[in-house]
Amino acid sequence: MDLITDFEWYNNLGVVVKFDKVKYQETFQIFPDDFGYVRGIGKTIINIRWNYNGQPIVFTNVWYEGTLPTPNMDKVIVTTSELGEYTTTIYNADGSVHKVVEMPYPIMPNLGRGPTRDEKPETSEVYWCRKKVDDYSMLIRLGYHDAWEERYFNPETGEIGGLRSDKSYGYY
């Protein structure tokens, strides 16, 4: 099976951030401070591209913190925003849709503030999570109006599971 190669994010100002799988296993992907927003210019347009079987695959206008290849490098999680609504979709390496992710209601304890039980998340960010040496799962951080929760995420099924730990939620 051919895998994703040369994955990168780039903005409309020409700034390119290359995905480094070896580096990413030890830390989060680091983006320059002015990658998504430039003072005096405003929000930049973020795009992604990768190669699959010698063919370039390109997606435009993505939410860069919610867009990442899977640990197996056989799929890409892409989050987009249109009119303030975020959609997270799992794409196969060839760019075809694998699954649209159904966003869940919050499961974090409601401590007098934060999302209500019938509130869907406003944003999502995806990460790798090391289970053991060379074995990774994925996490998704769901952002509500003034709170967040970090939950396990299965990129094969699109299922969003339980909280990573009892400290995997907080308030902005």
Image (cartoon, rainbow, N blue to C red):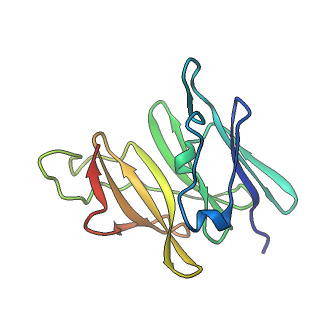
Of 97 and 14, the residue lying toward us:
14
Q: Residue furthest top?
A: 40
Locate residue 32, reporting x and y percent: 59, 41
Of 167 and 5, the residue lying toward us:
167
Q: Quadrant of residue 21?
A: bottom right
Query: For this view, does 76 lie left or right of residue 170?
Result: right
Query: For this view, does 78 lie left or right of residue 139?
Result: right
The residue at the point 21 percent across, 46 percent down is 114
The residue at the point 85 percent across, 55 percent down is 55
Q: Quadrant of residue 26?
A: bottom right
The residue at the point 24 percent across, 58 percent down is 108
Vertical arrangement, residue 171 with respect to residue 55, above or below: above
Q: Where does the C terminus fall, quadrant-wise?
A: top left
Q: Residue furthest left?
A: 112
Locate residue 95, reporting x and y percent: 72, 55
Q: Where does the N terminus fall, quadrant-wise?
A: bottom right
Locate residue 19, reporting x and y percent: 68, 56
Of 126 and 17, the residue lying toward us:
17
Vertical arrangement, residue 40 with respect to residue 74, above or below: above
Vertical arrangement, residue 141 with respect to residue 87, above or below: below
